[in-house]
Image: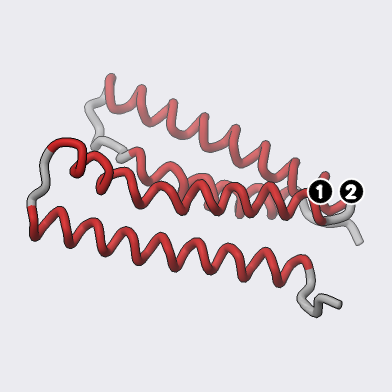
Amino acid sequence: MNSLSVNAKYTLSIMVWMMLYVVILVGTISMIRDRHPTGLLLYILSVAPALPIGGTIFVFQRHLDKVDEYVRAILTRRFITATGLTLFLCTAWGFLENGANVHHFSLYLVYPLFWICFGVASAFHRKIA
């Protein structure tokens, strides 16, 4: 019998992927800074930190499959709301960049922005227990 709850497995899996993200990020930044790679190696090192992000998305999808339909519906609604809010904010900021010449928003910040929006969406789409 497995003693970890669905939520504990989800949390543990996310923690593993985020630790892997930090290790890869620090390693690739150091390697790029110290060794100045070029060509294909530079591209591989530059994109490598994004791979664990894909792992966290997979973990979230797997988590949705393991929870009951009520929790799944709540999480799905939060996810959709957060996605829409993220798309809206990024699009609006893009227009500000073009029209008002505001500071450029780096695309690697979209993922953390999404999870901030997920937190905001969670405040509006709460469990009714």
Q: Residue at x 74, y 49 (%)?
A: 75
Q: Say left or right for 113 vs 7.
A: left
Where is 87 relative to 106, above or below?
above
Q: Label 1 is placed on what type of residue?
A: Arg
Q: What element carries label 1?
A: helix
Where is 84 relative to 17, above or below?
above
Q: Where is residue 99 in the image (x, y as percent from the top left)?
A: 28, 20
Q: Which residue is drawn at 70% across and 68% down?
A: 9
Where is 103 relative to 8, above or below?
above
Q: Say left or right for 31 vs 51.
A: left
Q: Pick whichever, 105 or 12, lies toward us.
A: 12
Q: Residue at x 24, y 39 (%)?
A: 43
| Quadrant of the frame with the C terminus | bottom right
Q: Where is residue 76 in the image (x, y as percent from the top left)?
A: 74, 43
| Mark 2 → mark 1, Cα distance in angstroms | 5 Å
Residue 69: assigned label: 2
Q: Position of residue 50 (x, y in %)?
A: 40, 47
Q: Pick whichever, 16 or 122, lies toward us.
A: 16
Contact (Cβ within 8 Å) of mark 2 with mark 1: yes
- Residue linked to disc 1: 72
Residue 8: assigned label: none
